[in-house]
Amino acid sequence: MGDVGVTAAQLILARAEAAGVVVEVDGDRLHLRAAAALPTDLVQELISAKAELLDLIAEREAIRSELTPPASGGAADDPFDVPQDEMLEGLRHAALRRPASWRGVDAIPTTGCWCVCCHGNHWWCRRVAPRCWLCSTCHPSPPNTATIEVQT
């Protein structure tokens, strides 16, 4: 597929970063930091693409700042900063959800579980095959069928 949509400045910057160069912008100046001497051709490419590199790094920093949340330190800004008791209640609530029907007669509906479709808590299962648990509201048991019924 090649370098579709990749600019020369992006290639030069990628080459410099692969060589261990840290490129920083200070106004209209580029500052290069490297642990070892850079190849002359790379230095020449960086110099010749200075204007494009300044724009590219500014664009990169703008995107990075959009993706970085503000450092306000406020708990209200963090959607994952939830009191532990609320988090545990939410997890318990999610763990008790059941589909309107499921295979596995050994997976007996537990106390507190509820149907995700109707929020009901009445379940039934045939006493003979095919055996699966069904919500009594969403899937009423057929008449004259031997069933096991559970209310949670």
Image (cartoon, rainbow, N blue to C red):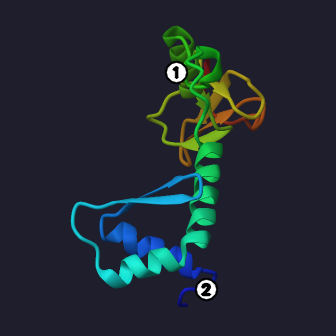
* In the displayed structure image, the side of residue 145 where residue 1 appears, left or right: left
The numbered mark, 2 or 1, whose residue comes first in the sequence reads 2
Q: Is residue 11 above or below residue 29?
A: below
Q: Residues within 10 Å of mark 1 (few under 14, many from 20)?
A: few
When asked about the image quadrant of residue 16, the answer is bottom left
Q: Is residue 64 above or below residue 11?
A: above
Q: Which residue is identified by label 2?
A: 4
Q: Give the residue type at disc 2.
A: Val
Identify the residue at horizontal 54%, vertical 47% (top origin): 129
Dot 2 and dot 1 residues touching (CB under 8 Å): no
Q: Residues within 10 Å of mark 2 (few under 14, many from 20)?
A: few
Tally the numbered discs: 2
Q: Is residue 109 above or below residue 87?
A: below
Q: Give the residue type at disc 1.
A: Thr
Image quadrant holding the N terminus, namely bottom right
Q: Secondary structure at mark 2?
A: loop
Identify the residue at horizontal 61%, vertical 44% (top origin): 65
Identify the residue at horizontal 44%, vertical 72% (top origin): 14
Q: Which residue is identified by label 1?
A: 110
